[in-house]
Image: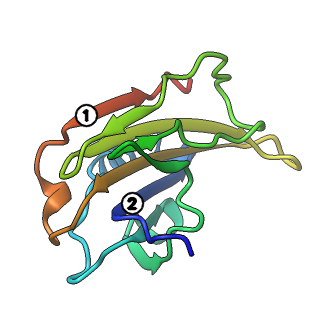
Amino acid sequence: MIEPMDAVVQRVRTSWTKKSRGGPDAALRNAAPTVFSLPPGLSSALHEVAMRESDSFEPRMQVRDLSAPGTILREVDGVLRVDPPAISTFAMPRRNRRPPAVRLAPGQWLQWQINYRFVGRCDGAWSYQLETFNILYGSATPDVFLGTPTRCVDERRALR
């Protein structure tokens, strides 16, 4: 029997098009948060938050199990090893070199950010995405991600 992992992942995904690259729509997009309060009593789960331009960046939330958090989590020798988030082979810019895995001690949390640009297959229109992974090793309180992370990894690049 596999023991449940004592970790909480909050994956915040913000998606937009060229419309939100400048002007008032860009201000609305830039104001979209990258951390949220967790639902009360959440443990060993994935808290997904999606914000889309088409919904005026209103957050849509759901809680799922940790079977597909978007990154590989492993407990090794009393620490949580967090491997770099999976990236699409269709996303730009290319990332030939990725940061190493991050190790978290109990009670520590990590914020890992990565952004992408995609090209539409039919019309060639560009779309963009920012993913923020907030990952806690240990028991979570609803406001755990509202403070300063123990570790940060920033893989954001210029998207043109």
Q: Earlier along the polypeptide chain: callout 2 or callout 1?
A: 2
Which quadrant does the N terminus fall into? Answer: bottom right
> Where residue 116 sits in the image (x, y, percent)?
58, 37
Q: Is residue 148 above or below residue 15?
A: above
79 versus 101 height, above or below:
below
Q: Distance between the residues labelled 2 and 1?
A: 14 Å
Q: Residue at x 46, y 65 (%)?
A: 50
Judge left or right: residue 66 versus residue 39. right
Residue at 67% x, 29% y is: 92
Mark 1 burial class by Cα count in 10 Å: few <14, some 14-19, many 20+: some
Q: In this view, does 96 lie above or below 25?
A: above
Q: Position of residue 57 (x, y in %)?
A: 40, 63
Q: Report the residue at 39% width, 60% height from top.
A: 9
* Mark 1, secondary structure of its residue: strand
Quarter of the image for residue 89 reads top right
Tell which of 17 and 136 is nearer to you.
Answer: 136
Q: Does the image show residue 28? A: yes
Give the amino acid type for the residue marked by disc 1 in the picture.
Answer: Arg
Q: Is residue 146 above or below residue 90?
A: below
| Residue 101 image offset from top left, x and y in percent | 47, 31
Q: Which residue is drawn at 86% across and 46% down?
A: 121
The residue furthest right is 122
Front-lying residue, 54 or 60:
60
Element under disc 2: strand
The type of residue carrying mark 2 is Val
- Is label 2 in contact with label 1 (beta carbons under 8 Å)? no
Q: Which of 114 and 70 is in front in this view?
A: 70
Residue 11, image x and y in percent?
43, 58
- Number of marks drawn: 2
Which residue position is annotated with label 2?
Answer: 9
Q: Which mark is residue 151?
A: 1
Q: Quadrant of the C terminus?
A: top right
